[in-house]
């Protein structure tokens, strides 16, 4: 790998700053704590946007088409012809080579999937059905739990896996697969298939209580489990739980579950007051972003939200959900999000890029093609990031790391370019 003289100097200073792998990952020490970054974060406790401003920011995201329409005001009447077109020829089935369990998927196999999608029965006008998630669920781009890959040797990045959603998340069901096992639904950030058993149907009035609850708490711990209808239901950081009243020691939380007919029911649960839950959204500050992001440190890399974890953009989704900001789901869309942006692609030298990082607020996104990182700040002139990373390259060899880690920007991509060299822009999610 070709390394310029300036990069060598950069790496030498990095190695002096803390103990790291040769590749640039921090393995021990204070830099693995949020406090190390918060102490150096000037005005990190200042509120970036209040809830009224966050509402305006989310509206901007909708205007740009980066997230879906506002559930509070949208109609359940949906253009069926558009949905039919979306489902008639899914992009995954258009892939030239697609593999299932190491075997090339045939046209006949694809036709069976299309038959289960059953797009031809979708009417020109759809009356969407109101539903709520009753547990952590996976959003798929085909109505199947089977994994499909672009390479027969690949086993991490399932081409069908899109995202994950949490208990209490509202959605609008637009279609059901022929076998009845999956529903195609509109979620806050995008559309996709969800297991029918993971949702419960309700009327609009009840649905709106989940869309815009009057009182709610947000999970600010990495994860927890709550007992609901005989099941220990998993919740991930950022999950919102509606409650009806708050006592001295607990909230009267309303936990959704699905009855035998598929309809929504609720169980009152005395949710103890603790640091694990925040009454309403957290204040949107740079320090809070960093504190919440570090809750995932060491977690497995969760492609599209699998393994009850996060991938690079999923980290931003969960963290910013605690503050009520509906960040886009994919890294390419995060790159287009409104806010103060710095165009790193226009900077020709490493020195210019290092200098530009001084203008990036900690907790902001550093965007590369296909990857997004959370900027933490500099130590001894070396910039660091927190990110959920699957792999990087050493001298052209792919090395899997598959975890949420703190690193510098000296990691290399397949091209041999460092992460610093490949940053396209920064996004700070603000008006």
Image (cartoon, grey):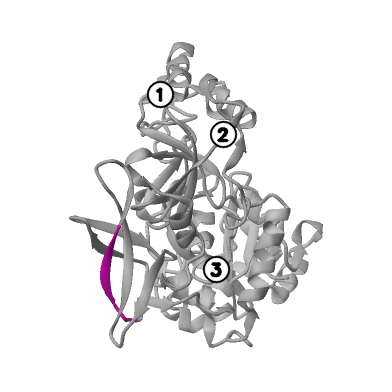
Q: Main secondary structure of the magenta part?
A: strand
Q: Which one is nearer the viewer's eye here, 326 or 360?
A: 326
Q: Which residues are magenta?
A: 266-274
Residue 178 numbered mark, or none: 1
Mark closer to the chain start, 1 or 3: 1
| Residue 37 position within the rendered picture, expressed as x and y whole percent measured from the top left | 53, 81
Disc 2 target residue: 126
Tag 3 secondary structure = loop
Mark closer to the chain start, 2 or 3: 2
Disc 3 target residue: 324
Find residue 44 and report its image quarter.
bottom right
- Quadrant of the image for the C terminus? bottom right
| Residue 119 position within the rendered picture, expressed as x and y whole percent measured from the top left | 52, 23
Q: Which one is nearer the viewer's eye here, 330 or 197?
A: 197
Residue at image coords 58%, 27%:
84
Q: Reply above or below: 113 against 82.
A: above
Tag 2 secondary structure = strand
């Amino acid at each position: 790998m070709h390394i310029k003289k300036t990069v060598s100097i950069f790496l030498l200073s990095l190695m002096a700053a803390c103990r790291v792998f040769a590749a640039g990952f921090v393995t021990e020490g204070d830099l693995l704590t949020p406090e190390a970054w918060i102490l150096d974060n000037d005005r990190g406790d200042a509120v970036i946007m209040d809830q009224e401003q966050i509402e305006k920011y989310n509206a901007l995201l909708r205007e740009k088409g980066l997230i879906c329409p506002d559930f509070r005001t949208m109609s359940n009447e949906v253009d069926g012809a558009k949905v039919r077109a979306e489902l008639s020829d899914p992009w995954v089935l258009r892939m030239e080579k697609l593999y299932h369990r190491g075997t090339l998927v045939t046209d006949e196999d694809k036709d069976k999937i299309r038959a289960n999608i059953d797009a031809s029965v979708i009417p020109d006008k759809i009356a969407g059905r109101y539903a709520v998630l009753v547990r952590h669920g996976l959003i798929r781009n085909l109505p199947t739990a089977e994994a499909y890959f672009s390479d027969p040797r690949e086993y991490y990045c399932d081409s069908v896996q899109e995202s994950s959603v949490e208990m209490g998340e509202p959605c609008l069901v637009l279609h059901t697969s022929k076998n009845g096992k999956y529903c195609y639904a509109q979620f806050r950030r995008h559309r996709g298939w969800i297991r029918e058993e993971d949702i419960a149907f309700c009327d609009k009035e009840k649905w709106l209580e989940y869309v815009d609850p009057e009182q709610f708490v947000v999970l600010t711990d990495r994860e927890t489990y709550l007992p609901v209808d005989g099941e220990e239901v998993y919740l991930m950081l950022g999950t919102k739980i509606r409650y009806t009243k708050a006592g001295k020691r607990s909230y009267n939380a309303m936990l959704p579950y699905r009855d035998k007919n598929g309809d929504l029911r609720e169980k009152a649960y005395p949710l103890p007051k603790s640091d694990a839950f925040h009454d309403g959204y957290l204040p949107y500050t740079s320090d809070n972003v960093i504190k919440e992001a570090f809750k995932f440190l060491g977690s497995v890399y969760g492609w599209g939200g699998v393994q009850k974890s996060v991938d690079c953009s999923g980290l931003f989704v969960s963290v910013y959900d605690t503050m009520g900001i509906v960040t886009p789901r994919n890294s390419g869309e995060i790159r287009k999000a409104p806010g103060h942006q710095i165009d790193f692609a226009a900077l020709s030298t490493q020195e210019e890029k290092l200098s530009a990082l001084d203008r990036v607020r900690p907790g902001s996104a550093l965007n590369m093609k296909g990857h997004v990182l959370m900027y933490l700040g500099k130590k001894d002139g070396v910039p660091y990031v927190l990110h959920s990373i699957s792999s990087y390259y050493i001298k052209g060899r792919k090395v899997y790391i598959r975890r949420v880690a703190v690193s510098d920007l000296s990691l290399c991509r397949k091209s041999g370019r460092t992460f610093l060299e490949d940053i396209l822009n920064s996004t700070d999610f603000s008006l």
